Structures are given as structure tokens and as C-alpha cells.
Amino acid sequence: MPERDCRPTEIDLSGAMDALCRDLCGSLPELKHIDPDRVLFSLSRSRAKGTHGVYARIAPLRFCNGHRENSRRRGRYLETFRMPVLHHNGRDILYLITLMTPRFLRLPLEQKLMTVIHELYHISEAFDGDIRRFPGRNFAHGHSRKAYNRIIGALMQSYLGTTPDPALLNPLQFDEKDWQEGRVRLSGLRVPLPKAKLVARLRV
């Protein structure tokens, strides 16, 4: 009788999400403005238990309208900040999307998929390194978070309607228990969150 193969399934989650991103952007007209070569997926550790909290976050690497520098007045000073340059494998990255693990693993497949689409939909239609900006004070999600989530849900259903390759969704099938019990071994990029640097401070 042949021995059962008990080796864990190896998943490069950064690579898997990159492949999924490319298929999403090629399948959904609402995401066709995105160049996947300039989007990078990273992993970060979430330590709190349960499903409450952030599952993923997107870091745009440019200010409003794609500018690398932004000036603002603070008291008697005019401060200028500059966004860092992030390169990966010769690519100039405009957006860093970080998945919070293992919290992300606790979600069912459809919610994992919605989380990835949610972050991609934040990307500016100009694809200039800034985020999509809605009218009003809550420019990141618009006047209603529920309305934003309805858009994401509709996009997910549209994507599933294209009958994507199951291999693209398989990495979303695994959960935290699979990881904890050693059936899945996760790997991925660990990229520190880029922060704007103060480059000038003038008294005005």
C-alpha cells in the first residue's frame, strides 16, 4: 500500500494574490485601469484573535493627483513631505496591499475575494499612485460604507460569473486551522509600510 503524502501544501500568498489580481484586472472593466506590475502584495502579522479588525490595507505611494511631494501648513511652518520610492524586481511600485495574517485566513472564500477586490477598487482610476477619491469628507469610501460594499459584492459576483480558473481561488480555500495544524505552509513578501518623509520645513 503506497504511503500517504503528508507534506504540507506550500502557498506563496503574495504570488497567489498577484496572479489573482492580474486575472481580476483582466476580467472586470471596473479594474482594467490597473497595471498589476505596479501593485505589490505583502503579508503582515495580526495578533488579535477573532475576525474583528483590519483584514487588509492598501498603501498608495503618491499623494493626491499622483504627486510625490505634498506641503501643508503646521502652525508657523510650511512642511513638505515626500513619498518613498519602492522597487521590486525592477518594477516601480505604486500601491502596496498588505494582507493581515492569520486574520485574513479566518474569512470564508467569498469574503477573502471581496477583501482583495475592496483594496483594488481603492486604486485611483488615473492609476497615478493615489487612491480613488469620492466626493465629501469620507473620500475613501464615499457617503456610505454599505454602498461601497454593495459595489464590491457586485464586482465579486461578476468575476465569479466569468468562471475563473479554480487554481486562482484555491489559495483562498485554506483557513487558519489548516495553517495552525501544518497542512498549509504560508510564505510571502514582508514589506514595511512606506512612510512619507519630511524633506523641508520653512517658517512662514
Image: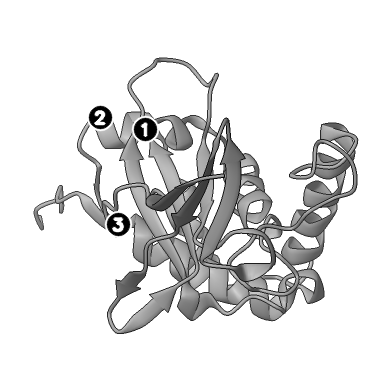
Q: Residues within 10 Å of mark 1 (few under 14, many from 20)?
A: many
Nearer the observer: mark 2 or 1; the answer is 1
| Residue that lies at the very extreme toward the front in this rendered image | 204
Measured Cα–Cα span from mark 2 to mark 1: 9 Å
SS type, badge 1:
loop
Residue, disc 1:
102
Please name the amino acid that badge 1 sits on: Pro
Which of the 4 image quarters holds residue 137?
top right
Is residue 6 depicted above or below 163 in this figure?
above
Q: Is residue 51 visible?
A: yes
Residue 156 percent location from the top left of the image: 75, 55
Nearer the observer: mark 3 or 1; the answer is 1
Which image quadrant: the C terminus?
A: top right
In this view, the residue in front, 182 or 136, is 136
Residue, disc 2:
180
Residue, disc 3:
11
| Residue that lies at the very extreme toward the top in this rendered image | 49
SS type, badge 3:
strand
Residue 110 percent location from the top left of the image: 65, 45
Measured Cα–Cα span from mark 3 to mark 1: 14 Å
Measured Cα–Cα span from mark 2 to mark 3: 14 Å
Residue 129 percent location from the top left of the image: 58, 67
